Amino acid sequence: MFCQYCGSQNPDGVGFCSNCGAALTPSANPAAAPVYTQPPMQQGAPVSTLPPVTPLAPVTMIPQQKRNYLCNVGFFCALLSWPLMGIPAIPALIISIMGLISSQKNNERGRGFAIAGIIISLVFIITGIVAAVVAIINNNIE
């Protein structure tokens, strides 16, 4: 028995096509050529039955904020305080404070680097002061 929709050969007595799953109806002549119920395609007809694609709205770009480079310089100077034994800590503190003030005034990015630079450089400055005080106390005791 031939499927009326896809034309594939199926065993007699089955209710559905093994190829497309359509319901099969028994015909008077089982060896007859398949009969298609789908209308033939017309010249120039669209091949796809998908809905037409609608164009998307134009994308508007969000302007990026400028980056304040004083914030980055202050942060990296503060990081250099570790291998250089705290020597650039005071300039790093000053540069980071200048970067923080400038970035807030001009609404620029980099405030996190400035705050981190301030914290790191303050840690090294306080550590240096404590170490100096402890050394002075130890020299006076002996």
Image (cartoon, rainbow, N blue to C red):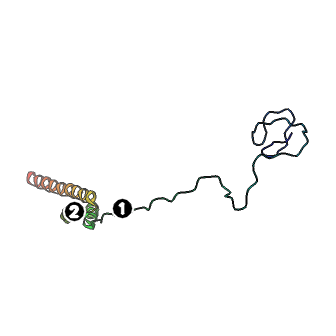
Residue 13 location (% of width, % of height): 85, 32
Residue 10 location (% of width, % of height): 84, 39
The residue at the point 78 percent across, 36 percent down is 16
Q: Earlier in the sequence, mark 1 or mark 2?
A: 1
Residue 6 location (% of width, % of height): 78, 46
Nearest the viewer among 49 and 85 is 49
Q: Secondary structure at mark 2?
A: helix
Residue 89 location (% of width, % of height): 21, 62
**Is disc 1 surrounded by few (<14), some (14 to 19) or many (20+) residues within 10 Å?**
few
Nearest the viewer among 142 and 95 is 95
**Is disc 2 surrounded by few (<14), some (14 to 19) or many (20+) residues within 10 Å?**
many
> What residue would you read off at disc 2?
96
Q: CA distance from mark 1 to mark 2?
A: 28 Å
Nearest the viewer among 12 and 116 is 12
Residue 59 appears left or right of 105: right
Amino acid of disc 2: Ser
Indicate the quadrant where residue 105 lies.
bottom left
The quadrant of the rendering that contains the N terminus is top right
Q: Secondary structure at mark 1?
A: loop
The residue at the point 64 percent across, 52 percent down is 49
Residue furthest left as drawn? 140
The image shows residue 98, relative to residue 18, as above or below, that is below
> What residue would you read off at disc 1?
62
Marker count (numbered): 2
The image shows residue 39, relative to residue 86, as above or below, that is above
Amino acid of disc 1: Ile
The residue at the point 86 percent across, 37 percent down is 27
Nearest the viewer among 33 and 117 is 33
Indicate the quadrant where residue 122 lies.
bottom left
Residue 39 appears left or right of 137: right
The image shows residue 13, relative to residue 87, as above or below, that is above
